[in-house]
Amino acid sequence: MNYQRAEFVISAAKLRDCPPDSLAEVAFAGRSNAGKSSAINTLTRQGQLARTSKTPGRTQLINFFRVAEGRYLVDLPGYGYAKVPLKVKDDWQVHLEHYLNTREPLAGLVLVTDIRHVFKDFDLMMIDWARQNQLPLHVLLTKSDKLKRGGVQDALQKARLALEGLEDASVQSFSSLKRLGVDVLSQRLDEWLEP
Ligand code: GDP
């Protein structure tokens, strides 16, 4: 799949706004600031595709990028944006759960985590959710350029331990800054998106 062909389609506030023609899609989730937007921009080689600066008002929106006919990358709202009022956080959780629980074409979940924080509350919640729903999971440990080689290996090991018991889970290190890990990510996405 050529992810450079990704194009923005819609920001969906509700499940009914999600593209009806989707045959397969992969959702990206992560805490705010984990590096999710940067990872999507790096994968697609489009600097501005997923906005790296976010405003609280956009928190509840699910952004869809078409990569091929009926194939989508989905940017889920970042979790834990500090300035968002509690009410919006609640709405966010309801939206996200609704999407994750009912979206038929959802083929896999990419969990984006800062490699220096393996794993925090939100990540553990998502891993648990993937386990319960038997959804294939790929963990992207971003900002790997921030650690030395040994630190990267330790983080990978820690992540693998936390993923034990999941039927279909994988983990990799990734750096948007250095463009490291793009091929591994593309291959995993291909498994989910290619017909
Ligand atoms: P998001 O909130 O998860 O979408 O995170 P962003 O993509 O906006 O990134 C949050 C911050 O981390 C920004 O300042 C980015 O420049 C920085 N960042 C993202 N990816 C990397 C990376 O691979 N390496 C380094 N050093 N910084 C990164």
Image (cartoon, rainbow, N blue to C red):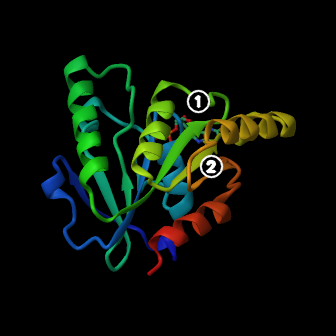
- Evaluate whether residue 32 shows in this view: no
Q: CA distance from mark 1 to mark 2?
A: 20 Å
Residue 167 location (% of width, % of height): 56, 53
Q: Amino acid at mark 2?
A: Ser
As rendered, which of 129 and 174 lies closer to the eye? 129
Residue at 24% across, 38% down: 60
At 66% from the left and 38% from the top, the residue drawn is 159
Q: Position of residue 56 (x, y in %)?
A: 28, 30
Mark 1 vs mark 2: give the one in front: 1
Which of these two is toward me, 154 or 79? Answer: 154
Residue 45 lies left or right of residue 133; in this view the side is right
Q: In this figure, which residue is indicated by the disc labeled 2? A: 176
* Residue drawn at point x = 28 percent, y = 48 percent: 101
Q: Quadrant of the C terminus?
A: bottom left
Crowd around label 2: few <14 · some 14–19 · many ≥20 (10 Å): many
| Amino acid residing under circle 1 | Phe
Crowd tier of the residue under label 1, counting other residues whose Cα lies within 10 Å: few below 14, some 14–19, many 20 or above: some
Residue behind label 2 places its C-beta within 8 angstroms of ligand 1: yes
Q: Quadrant of residue 97?
A: top left
SS of the residue under disc 1: loop
Q: Quadrant of residue 152?
A: top right
Residue 124 in sight here = yes
Please indicate whether residue 91 sits to the left or right of residue 141 in the image: left
Asked if labels 2 and 1 touch by Cβ distance under 8 angstroms, the answer is no
Query: Where is mark 1, residue-wise?
Result: 119
Mark 1 or mark 2, earlier in chain: 1
| Quarter of the figure with residue 183 | bottom right
Q: Secondary structure at mark 2?
A: loop
